[in-house]
Image: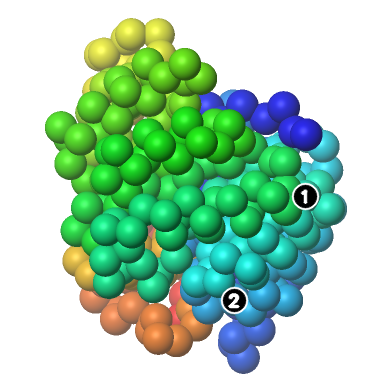
Amino acid sequence: MSNFKPEGVIPAALMPFTERLDVDEAQYRKHLADIAAVEGISGITINGHAAEVHALTIEEQCRAMAVTKEVLGNRTPMIVGIFTNSSLEAARLAARAQREGADALLVFPPDMMVLGGHLRPEMIHEHLRRITGASSLPIILFQYPLVSNLAYPLSTLISLCETFPQIRAIKDQCGDGNLHERQIRELKSLDRPVNTLTTHSAWLLGSLALGCDGLLSGAGSTIAPLQVALYRAVRKGDLDEARAINDRIYPTVRAFYDAPLLDMHNRMKVAQVLLGRLPAAHVRPPLMPLPAQEVDKIERLLAEAGLLRMETKRTRTA
C-alpha cells in the first residue's frame, strides 16, 4: 500500500494531441518532464480534466499510466484519475493504476449522478466500495462545484471519509467560501483527519489561507513554480510575499478561467504553445480551437504575469 500523503502542490497534466487528434506521446513525455522538473511539487495528476479525460478511451488512459510511470519513475508520485460512469470499470481502472505503479487515485463522481445522485448517497458509497475493493491506493475524492449538482452534501462527504479509510484528501471545488471553510474544519476534526487540496484556482490565495493542505490544479501544468511559491508563502505566514506572488498569478486567472469555463484547459494548451513548451494546442471535439482574439488575450495576460515577452516572435499552431 502506498504511503503517499496528499499535500503540497500537485499539478494536473495536459494531454497533447497531434493534428489528427491522436495522442502525441512524445510531447506528453516532454510535458511530464517539464512539470516534474519544477522544484517543490508533491506529485503529478494524470487522466483528469486537464488531460481531457472525457475524450480519452480506456486504452489511452491505461497507456498514459504506463508512459507517465516511465517518465516519472519513483522520483515524482503519480496520481491517476478514475473518471467513468461505470463502477465496475472504475474498479478495473483502479486495479490497473495500482499495477502500473500509481501512488494514489483521484476519484471523480460518475456524471450520471447529476440527475439526483445526492439524494441516493448509497450510490456513491457503492462506487467507492468497488474501487477500494480493487485497489489499496490512497484516494483523493473530488468534491465538485455545488452548481454542477454532483457535489456531495457535507453529511455524505463525512460519511464517505469515515467509511473508507483510503480517502486521505478531497480535491475541493465546491465554489462556496462558507462551505469550503466548513469542510476544511470538519474533515480535520475527524478521528482520522482528511486533508483538503484546493482547486479553487480563481481565488487560490484566499482558499489556501483558510487552511488547505495544498492544491491540485490543472493550472499547475503551466504555472507550477508560481503555485509552489504561493503555497510556501502562505505556509510560512508571509502575507506580503503571498500577495506579491498572487499579483503575478492573477493575470493567468483571467487568461484561463473566463467564461466559458469548459475552455480552461484549452487555454492552458494555448499558453503552452505561446511559452514554447508545446508545438500545437490541438483539442478533441466537442472542444474547439480558440478564436484568434482569445489567443491574443492569453498572450497579453501571460506577458502581464511576467511569463513571456510580448515582442518575442512565435509561430502558433491551432
- The residue under the point 61% across, 27% down is 5
Pointer 2 residue:
56
Task: Say which residue appears at 53% left-offset and 41% top-offset.
Answer: 140
Three-letter code for the amino acid on which mark 1 is drawn: Gln
Regarding mark 2 in the picture, which secondary structure is present there?
Answer: loop
Residue 3 to residue 67: above or below: above
Quadrant of residue 138 in the image? top right
Residue at 64% from the left image edge and 69% from the top image edge: 89
Observer-nearest residue: 189 or 300? Answer: 189
What count of labels does the image hold?
2
> Is residue 277 shown to the viewer in this render?
no
User: What colour scheme was applied to this rendering of the protein?
Assistant: rainbow
Q: Which mark is residue 269?
A: none
Mark with earlier residue (2, 1) = 2
Q: Residue furthest top?
A: 237
Residue 124 on image: x %, y %: 45, 55
Residue 261 place in picture, x, y as percent? 27, 65
Position in image of residue 59 (x %, y %): 73, 76
Mark in the foreground, 2 or 1: 1
Above-or-below relation of 16 to 238: below
User: Crowding near pointer 1: few (<14 within 10 Å), some, many (20+)?
Assistant: many
- Left or right: where 318 falls relative to 96: left
Classify mark 1: helix, strand or loop.
helix
User: What's the residue type where badge 2 is placed?
Assistant: Leu
Q: Quadrant of residue 180?
A: top left
Q: Is residue 125 left or right of residue 77?
A: left
Tell me the residue at 30%/68% (across/down). 114
Rendering coords of residue 183 (x, y %): 29, 30
Mark 2: give few (<14), some (14-19) or many (20+) Cα within 10 Å.
Answer: some
Q: Which residue is mark 1?
A: 98
